[in-house]
Amino acid sequence: MAASYAQASGAPAPGGTSGGQGATIVSTWDFGAAANAAAFAKLRAGGTLIDAVEAGAMVPEADPTNHSVGYAGYPDRDGHVTLDAVIMDDAGGVGAVAALENTVHAISVARRVMERTPHTFLVGEGATRFARDQGFPQQSLLTPESEKAWRDWLKTAKYQPEANSENRTRTPGGALDHDTIGLLARSADGRLAGACTTSGMAFKMRGRVGDSPQVGSGLYVEAGIGGATSTGLGEEVTRVAGSARVVASMRSGASPQKACEEVVRHIAHLRGDAIRGVQVGFLALDPKGNVGAFCLLPGFTYAVTDAHGVTKVLKAASLFQA
């Protein structure tokens, strides 16, 4: 599938197949291009939207060079790598996990929560036990590189959020504090699904959970309206139920772009100087395939794959210039 870099300026069953025809897939950050490719391939092979977003999220989860998601994620301040994930369709089906340990594919465990339990959210020891019960292999997630970054951090033990830590040019060992990958997929008939997965804030307090696995914060999808996912410092997204707020704006008639802009501006107004130097961004998709993205600071990128499987990595517009 081709990829390029550019500047942005009566329903069937949920998760129905599209065969890739007329589909749209979007995801956060430049590494989302590989995730989109996996998601598109799954749709082209006859998979459902849920199959597609799961397949897409699994790509960065297994990537040892990605320290913000899955295997090789940066640990908490006690040296434990813990994972958070959520998966959702547009009919209200949802599953999530948080503080999951020793399991590479948190998104797949989240899907099992959705499909095989009466619950929507499992956390900590319970989530890890459920993963073992479901046959997911136990595997250490801490790699020599991520362990070294943690030990280097311990020398100062100073946490300072760094905007756009997901950019692949960052150097391990700094305060690379967040983030995630969020994916949204649309079928030819306008159905939607989404997924979000992360190892969370680097060197976070033990037990910290950010926006990513929380329905309405890290991800929200609604039939006939659209879907949204967030990126950046999770605490700021969670304060306003950011993704649900984006979708609510779309429900009121805003385009995906205007909805993302509205919520970012709301956060800036609400928080004032408290969000200076902090990145928060949103990515949204509607049933017609319209895409929107907006962030506080320059640097947020996102990947869009069209019905032909062609992917472009775009730069989101930002509220502030620095």
Image (cartoon, grey):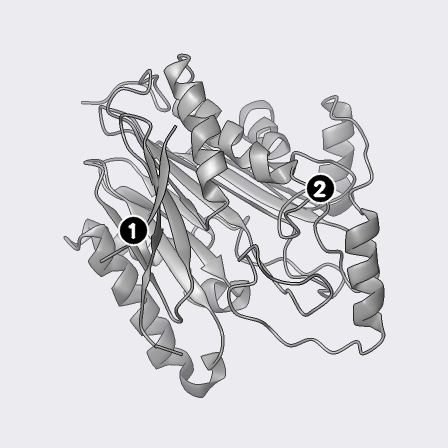
Image height check: is 166 above or below 142?
below
User: Is residue 274 shown left or right of residue 287?
Assistant: right
- Which numbered mark, 1 or 2, is in the foreground of this view? 2
Marks 1/2: CA–CA distance: 31 Å
Circle 2: element type: loop
Residue at 54 percent across and 30 percent down: it is 114
Give the quarter of the figure containing the N terminus.
top left
Is residue 91 visible in the rendered structure shown here?
Answer: yes
| Nearest to the observer: residue 118 or residue 226 | 226
| Residue at the spot of label 1 | 247
Image height check: is 318 above or below 37?
below
Q: Quadrant of residue 43?
A: top left
Residue 186 picture location, percent across and down:
31, 31
Can you name the residue that lies furthest to the bottom here? 273
User: Is residue 134 shown left or right of residue 177?
Assistant: right
| Residue at the spot of label 2 | 71
Residue type highlighted by circle 1? Val
Residue 185 picture location, percent across and down:
36, 34
Is residue 119 visible in the rendered structure shown here?
Answer: no
| Nearest to the observer: residue 188 or residue 5 | 5
